[in-house]
Amino acid sequence: MIRKLGNKLLIKVFNIKITLKNYLSNEVSIKNKLIPLGTNCYVRFKLSQYGVKPKKNKGELSFPFDLSRIPIEEIPKILKNNFADYFDNIEYSVNNQHWINTKYKILYIHDKTKEKSEFITRYKNRINNFNKILKLKKVILITTVRNLESEKIINDIYEALTKKACNDNFKYVVCNFINTEKKLDTSKINQNIKYKEILCNENYWNNWWQTENDCLKNNYEITKEFIDYIKEISNQF
């Protein structure tokens, strides 16, 4: 079976995908341009999976919101205080075997180290990368969220980013994965925000990290809509 995702060819043989992205994508030119900004690891995972965002071995930096799960309402609070108290409420969950920020309700499900000093050093480096990149180059910051209920939250995030960046060298993108009942009043959203609603069933949202194949109905098409939208914005910026 042969499918096309944007300008990338996928060949599926016996449930194994072979991708030509390593040969066709311009990974060097987009390095450190697409920055995840919550609410989980969807942005980092999907964009890297399909060759739109380079992987670490291609020189891509890591940032504080890449691989954590965070409620969207906590993001503007962290940005506005410039991560000032980010490490004040860090605890290790023995049951879940990962770190938790109890104040901001952040789950670091991919950071398995049990050494607090190592964890803090890792995230200080990621925060430093984030702060520097906002000052140095044009970037696209991307939030994915499920059934967003308030326009104010993303407006607050955009305002905080504007103050941190001190310039207009960024785009803020919000992809709201909705069901048929959940939609926002787009007239209340800051017009500088690139906002897109993507119709998404529970099957997709609960299983998006799994390999997309014919067993996961419509998953391929939903991912394609997200990927194509990010590529379109990236090509224009």
Image (cartoon, rainbow, N blue to C red):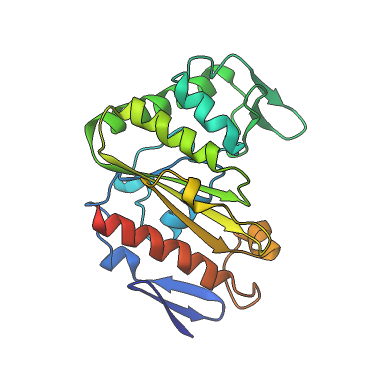
* 162 shown above or below 7: above
Which quarter of the figure has residue 181? bottom right
Q: Seen from this angle, which residue lies furthest front?
A: 187
Q: Residue at x 54, y 62 (%)?
A: 198
Quick check: can you spot residue 129? no
* 10 shown above or below 89: below
Quick check: can you spot residue 199? yes
**Image coords of residue 71 (percent x, y):** 62, 37
Q: Residue at x 58, y 57 (%)?
A: 177
* Residue nearest the viewer, comparing 88 with 233: 233
Q: Residue at x 54, y 54 (%)?
A: 176
* 39 shown above or below 126: below
**Image coords of residue 125 (percent x, y):** 40, 25
Marks counted in the figure total 0
**Image coords of residue 196 (percent x, y):** 47, 57
* Residue nearest the viewer, comparing 40 with 153: 153
Horizontal relation, residue 10 to residue 25: left or right: right
**Image coords of residue 30 (percent x, y):** 27, 51
Q: Seen from this angle, which residue lies furthest bottom?
A: 1
Horizontal relation, residue 113 to residue 132: left or right: right
Q: Residue at x 59, y 14 (%)?
A: 88
* Residue nearest the viewer, comparing 179 with 10: 179
Horizontal relation, residue 76 to residue 208: left or right: left
